[in-house]
Image (cartoon, rainbow, N blue to C red):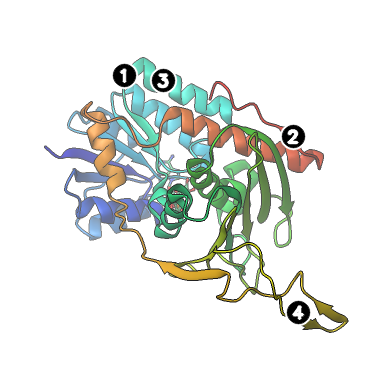
Amino acid sequence: MKKNLVVVGYGGMGAWHVNHAQKSDVVNLVGIYDIKEERNEVAREKGIFAYDSFEEVLADEKVDIVTVAIPNDSHKNVVIRALEAGKNVICEKPVAMNLSELDEMIETANRCGKIFSVHQNRRFDIDFLAMKQIKESGEIGQLINIESRVHGSRGIPGDWRGKKEHGGGMLLDWGVHLIDQLLQMMDGKLQKIYCEFDNITNLEVDDGIKLTMMFENGQKALVEVGTYNFIEMPRFYMRATEGTAIIDGWNDKAKVVKCTNMHESNVVPVVTAAGLTKTMAPRTDATTKTYEIEQPKSDVHDYYRNFVKAVDGVEPQLVTHSQMRRVMKVMMAAFESAKLGQTVDFDDNNN
Ligand code: NAD
């Protein structure tokens, strides 16, 4: 049977949840609640039920799940109140402002025996899934390093995302997605973190980040978010022991260049302005094979399908508390590294 859902916060992302819920095979949209009356009016004009208060949502016994899509600094209190009222909760990312807030939320979920998770919808992105597939297939050998980038050119949005007190900044906004994706791909324990921030269009919060995660096994993962990039770099770039894979733009297929013979006998040098070089001469088809991989199938609504199964106790929740804590710990370490201007150690135990 479908579970009854209320979306709290009817802004950009709240509207996304509402649209998805209206088409869902696992949840039934009961209504929304927004702290701003004009947003409730917009919902009502569309024929969506809008509650008069949050207390009314909490008191409504038919509500099984509350999705929280409000600014980041307000997540904790709303999530805790919903859990304590006996609701299961999906919270938008970043789940909290820091680790101690998150721990309070997890403790409440455990105490109340309710399912609580964060909406890591970008685990369903086909570019990420393509890279994960290439890495896991081993077709280009063992991973050396991966780079994941998103680049825009309009600066940080001028709303609450530009304000520190509301949990603004690109680390908490896009960084949280890209970190979560890469932690799903990388093996072994994370050991060190180095992070630099941009403050180009906003001095109060980071409007760009460059974060390197260093793993015990020597692998490295880079997350880069830019909001002042008038030329974008590729979305994904991955080097492995037997080849390289790249995805250029959001909708591009992954291109793979696999090395078929490391040793080339007759390298033709490339002519550069200051002279010839064999080291940097491009490979030919004689020692490499180039191909594209089909885009993986994906359905972002599987997130809700899993959540409902977790509520029914028939499947573990996709985004676990331990994964939520690990991502939050990475972001806390990134803030620390950016503040100190130094690499910081990462304790990957007890996530
Ligand atoms: P938004 O500003 O467009 O909308 C937020 C809405 O919440 C507003 O209508 C506001 O009036 C309402 N609100 C604020 N406090 C409230 C409260 N206490 N109770 C009820 N309503 C309240 O912001 P947004 O872009 O929709 O972002 C909301 C959340 O969703 C953020 O945490 C953001 O990081 C996340 N988000 C996630 C994704 C994703 O892909 N997963 C994308 C965008 C935003």
**Residue 147 in view, yes or no:** no
Question: Secondary structure under badge 4?
Answer: loop
Q: In this rendering, does residue 243 appear at all?
A: yes
Are the residues flagged by discs 1 and 3 in contact, CB closer than 8 Å?
no
Q: Which residue has dot 2 on it?
A: 344
Q: Give yes or no for contact between labels 4 and 1 (Cβ–Cβ under 8 Å).
A: no
Q: Which of pointers 4 and 3 lies earlier in the amino acid sequence?
A: 3
Which residue is the site of mark 3? 108
246 lies left or right of 137: right
Mark 4 vs mark 2: which is more N-terminal?
4
Q: Is mark 2 within 8 Å of ligand 1?
A: no
Between the residue at mark 4 and the residue at mark 3, the CA separation in whole angstroms equals: 64 Å
Q: Circle 3 sits in a helix, a strand or a loop, which is it?
A: helix
What crowding class fits label 3: few (fewer than 14 Cα within 10 Å), some (14-19), or many (20 or more)? some
- Please determine whether, in this image, residue 76 is positioned above or below residue 214: above
User: What amino acid is found at the position of numbered circle 4 in the picture?
Assistant: Pro
- Camera-side residue of 170 and 159: 170
Single out the residue that lies furthest toward the left: 1
Inspect the image, locate mark 2, and give the three-letter code of the amino acid beneath it: Val
Relative to residue 350, is residue 209 drawn left or right?
right
Mark 1 → mark 2, Cα distance in angstroms: 36 Å
- 78 with respect to 140 (left or right): left
Going from N to C along the chain, the mark reached first, 1 or 2, is: 1
The span from disc 3 to disc 2 (Cα, nearest Å) is 30 Å
Give me the disc on residue 113. Answer: 1
Distance in Å between CA atoms under marks 4 and 2: 42 Å
* Relative image position of residue 218 (x, y in whole percent): 66, 40
Which is nearer the eye, 28 or 178? 178
Residue position marked by numbered label 4 in the rendering: 269
